[in-house]
Image (cartoon, grey):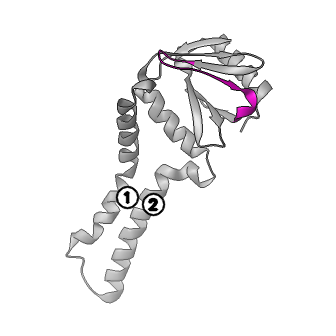
Amino acid sequence: MHLEYQLSQADFVHARGFGSSIQSFFGRFHLLRIPLWGVSWVLLVLLFARISGMQVTNWLVLLPALACFIYPLLFDYSGARLYRRMSNLRSPSSVDFSQEFVQFQTNDVTTRMGWKHFTSFAEDNTVFLLFSNGKRCYSIFPKHSMTQPQIDELRTILKTYIPHK
């Protein structure tokens, strides 16, 4: 099977969040965890003020909570910035799947990896992620560049050669 695709910034940012969400159970809540810390900080400050009878007149104590609330926006911003800095992500790419290996190709590089190199794969409604070296490294295949028969064929190939997580 042969696929040609070009990764968009939206694909990369989405795949980055999706990839980190399946790295661990708590990773699924990575964009909620830190804002919840911010809510906890606000509640603790207000509870301490209530118990001690003090008024919260210095709003600077709530700045850490504000930083926690904007974390999800910073996560997307950092992904977009990373995409813009890495020119190899923006170049047209192709991948060939065979019974023995997966071959990735860009304008500059051709890489061939055996199926044993890949540990798992994941899929959502916009991308396929093909993991290697555990769950830290993955290749992104955006579905918008595939037809429905290609999506079904890729899913079948991946299920045949690697375990689905």
- Of residue 105 and residue 64, the one placed in the foreground of this image is 105
Residue range of the region highlighted in magenta in the rendering: 105-119
Point out which mark residue 58 bears: none
Amino acid beneath label 1: Cys
Q: Residue at x 79, y 25 (%)?
A: 160
Per the image, label 2 sits on a secondary structure element best described as: helix
Residue 8 sits in which quadrant?
top left
Residue topped by disc 2: 36
Tell me the quadrant of the picture where the N terminus can be found: top right
Question: Would residue 64 be found to the left or right of residue 7 on screen?
Answer: left
Q: Residue at x 47, y 15 (%)?
A: 107
Question: Would residue 12 be found to the left or right of residue 24 on screen?
Answer: left
Amino acid beneath label 2: Leu
Residue 9 sits in which quadrant?
top left
- Of residue 85 and residue 30, the one placed in the foreground of this image is 85
Q: Is residue 138 magenta?
A: no
Residue 132 position within the rendered picture, expressed as x and y whole percent measured from the top left: 65, 36
Of marks 1 and 2, the one in the foreground: 1
Other-residue count near label 1 (Cα within 10 Å), few / some / many at <14 / 14–19 / ≥20: many
Residue topped by disc 1: 68
Q: Residue at x 48, y 53 (%)?
A: 32
Q: Is residue 111 magenta?
A: yes
Other-residue count near label 2 (Cα within 10 Å), few / some / many at <14 / 14–19 / ≥20: some
Residue 133 sits in which quadrant?
top right
Q: Residue at x 78, y 18 (%)?
A: 99
Mark 1 vs mark 2: which is more N-terminal? Answer: 2
In the depicted structure, whether residue 68 falls above or below residue 98: below
What is the CA distance from the residue labelled 1 to the residue labelled 2?
Answer: 8 Å
